[in-house]
Image (spheres, grey):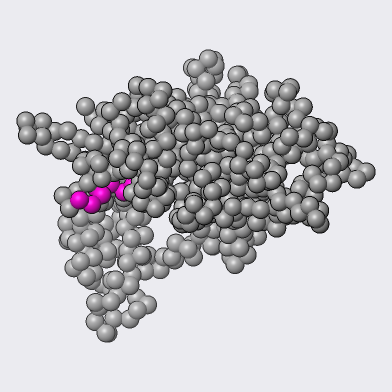
Amino acid sequence: MDVRTPFPALDHPELQDLSYIAITRFLRCASMLKDDILLPQPHSIPVTTAPDVLPPGITDFFSRSFNISCDAVDVLWGAVKHIAWTLPADGEEHEVIETMFQHHGQDQGISAYVLYPPMKTCVNPDCIAVQCATPLKKDEPRRVVIFTQAFGVRCAWSVHLKCRSCNVNYHHNYAVHGASRQYYSGVPKYIQVGEHQFVERELAMHWIDLMRIPVSATDCARLYNEAQARRKNVTCEWQFNTTEEVWDAFTVLALLDDHQLRNTSLCVPHDNSQSARNERIITEGQDELPHACYGCMRLFSMPDGTTHYTEVVVTDGITVGRPCCAVPHCKNALASTHNRFCSANPSHRQLETICAVDGCDQPVIRHGQGDKLRKTCSNPLHMNMEDAKAVLSWSGKSKTQRMKTAKLNDALAASSHDHPEDDLPVEDFDEWYEHDESTGNVRLKQASAALSMGVVNPSLTQNESRHILKVCPSKDDVPKLKLFVRPCGIISGRGTMYHHEAVSNVLILFEKTFSLPRARKPQHLIYNSNCNALREVESRKMKFFEGIGMCVDAFHHTTKHKASDQFCQERCSMKAYPKLLNEDGKYYFNSSIAEQTNMWFGGFHNMCHEMTPVKYDFFLDEVILRHNRATVINLHRQGKQPHHPHLST
């Protein structure tokens, strides 16, 4: 249909080929520009009537937008100006249409939101109906709700179309064949997150952005519900369970987005597992693993005309974890987040019935007359220790204590000569119990801060010399997380320390990360405990670290490491490497970037400390991925030319 069908008066030669879609766009644009059209008109022109003449700027805009002359624009305006002037605003029109469907359509099964599959015929290549192009007619409509960003919660219908020949069930987002769920390519406008729930794509992206700040899924839902309370005309009467929509939207959108970037289609069991993406990150690394830019890589022109470069990676630890088996270094998943030991190993499972106090092998007792087991035996001292920890957990102080790991503090600035016990890293005894033998009272103590300083051989002998009773780790004593961050802010990878952050484990994790197929081994590793790490490298003759400079970051080297440690001062100072200094002798790279990143990353502890292993890994990998995307955009704006060198050669 061309423009002459509804508007036969338009006989201008340039308008004869103008489509009906183009004329509707002209009307909508003109309606949006009413104020701009009216402002330069003479005072004698009434505001209720469309002016006969358009301002030159508006005419030129339409001329270039629709590829017609200014004369043709004037003819077109003369024919449709009264229609354009009376068109309602988009918001007003949407409310009118919503009211029509609500009052006159719901009882007929008609809605403004009806979600059909994108295909109308079966696309299963093994189906005989494909050759005949038989339409899908066997429908299964069901009531659903759509969570939208602009219009709140809306009632809708989701229509499934089933092929009569092969029984493939086509949904709005995916097709189900047997036990497999095959998603269509791309990311749909409305994402199914439950049996009766859909989330608008823009709202799901908004939730992910909030969670990256970080804002918990619970708070995302609360913010949305508060916005709904202020919204008018929210009259959806079809109510379903909405407790997991935020998390499910996060998961499904992340998976669809991941496959879209790789030009593949998501195919999962009908229970929608995230394990496959986790495995890919483990084997291939983060998308920005091969990253380089002028914020983390420095180029040098050598006297012979060749160009050399140096790249830096900074690492630091932070207490962001999940429940894990309390046996050191055990990576088996817990049967429940309420358990302290895994059930995969019988010897570990048996420890659930043994007193949790170090050195005690007595069986645990039950709480009063109930079936719930305590974590300690009948020894009154041990029971008091457990009760003291429970009181701390109820008060919320335990979580607050762990959040301090994300802050740049100077808690260890006091001289270690005044406190010999400070020679032991804080996380090795961040909670202990002091027993007053005269009164029988037990008091739980916590370190004022927890820094992740690696150790060579963690030991509890110093605790014992101070008559400190330490309880074995419970589900509150989560593993440490290790981040490898480039000075520009890109996170190259992460790893979990399941027990003490021994430097040997840090070195192994670093070697694994930068031995992946797409990785490049950096020329410098900056780490708070690199003096211990370098001793470990040299004693074990670790070939991977040959040629890698191992420095302590500038702040810790000055304030945390003893000036009397000659090895540290001579071998682990950034000042010993001219490539790490600029022409003024100042530090070229930001060696504190890991701690600065931890200030942001530490906020995820309370969000994920009760997650299952699969969900925990999936969530953290996703927030790192999106953090890196945002960082890359900023690096482009700063002119630092982020790129993947080995992919461009």
Any magenta on residue 532? no
The answer to whether residue 295 is seen in the rendering is: no
User: Does 98 sit above or below residue 272?
Assistant: below
Q: Is residue 587 magenta?
A: yes
Residue 487 in the image: above or below residue 148: above
Residue at the (40%, 25%) spot, across then down: 539
Q: Position of residue 92 (x, y in %)?
A: 49, 65
Q: Position of residue 418 (x, y in %)?
A: 52, 55
> Quick check: can you spot residue 552?
yes
Give the tally of numbered discs.
0
On the image, the x and y values in percent for residue 57 come to 20, 66
Q: Is residue 12 above or below residue 468?
A: below
Residue 86 location (% of width, % of height): 40, 68
Residue lying furthest left: 304
The residue shown at (50%, 23%) is 123
Give the prevailing secondary structure in the magenta stretch: loop
Q: Nearer the viewer, residue 482 or 13?
A: 482
| Residue at image point 78% right, 40% down | 375
In screen coordinates, is 202 left or right of 351? left
Q: Residue at x 70, y 58 (%)?
A: 395
Magenta segment, which residues?
585-592
Q: Answer left or right for 414 relative to 51.
A: right
